[in-house]
Amino acid sequence: MLFIKSRNLTLDQSEILYIESRAKKVEIHTERQNIEIYAAMDELEGQLGEGFYRCHRAYIVNMDRITEYDSESITLTSGDRVYLTKKKYGEFVKAYMWHLQNGGVSGV
């Protein structure tokens, strides 16, 4: 669960597709809604744990919701694409493969 203090909201992490940083706000994208809050990406990244990966300074993705990736982007079950920093590509592939081998869900 992810607890968002500023909105008194508790969100099931499995519902999160990805999180996007926009200036001082963060937008949490889920299948049903987008939730805009004031939060730091570092703080959210720490709360989310191993099932999520910070693929770019502006994006954190739920690895269970990845359907495809290449050296520049990650595609999620919603069809949304987010940037993947080139310098993190190798690290991402290792983390994603570990995730899949250790019980992660995948549409790939």
Image (spheres, helix red, strand yellow):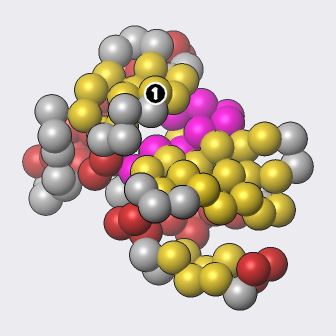
Residue 3 lies, with reference to residue 56, above or below; the image says below
- Magenta stretch? 55-62
Give the prevailing secondary structure in the magenta stretch: strand
Say which of 30 and 96 sits in front: 30
x and y, in percent, of residue 30 in the image:
48, 57
Q: Nearer the viewer, residue 107 or 55?
A: 107
- Residue 103 covered by magenta stretch: no
Helix, strand or loop under label 1: strand
Q: Residue at x 46, y 27 (%)?
A: 81
Q: Residue furthest bottom?
A: 8
Q: Amino acid at mark 1?
A: Arg
Q: Position of residue 27 (x, y in %)?
A: 68, 52
What residue lies at 67% left-to-right and 36% top-to-bottom?
58
Direction right: furthest residue: 24
Query: Which of the image's four quarters has the C terminus?
Result: top left
Does 82 appear above or below 6? above
Residue 102 picture location, percent across and down:
14, 55
Q: Quadrant of residue 40?
A: bottom right
The front one of 79 and 13 is: 79
Q: Is residue 94 left or right of residue 33?
A: left
The answer to whether residue 12 is visible is: yes
Classify mark 1: residues with Cα within 10 Å, few (<14), some (14-19) or many (20+). some
- Is residue 45 at least partly visible in the picture? no
**Label 1 sits on residue:** 81
Residue 29 lies left or right of residue 31; in this view the side is right
Q: Which of the 4 quarters of the picture holds residue 37?
A: bottom right
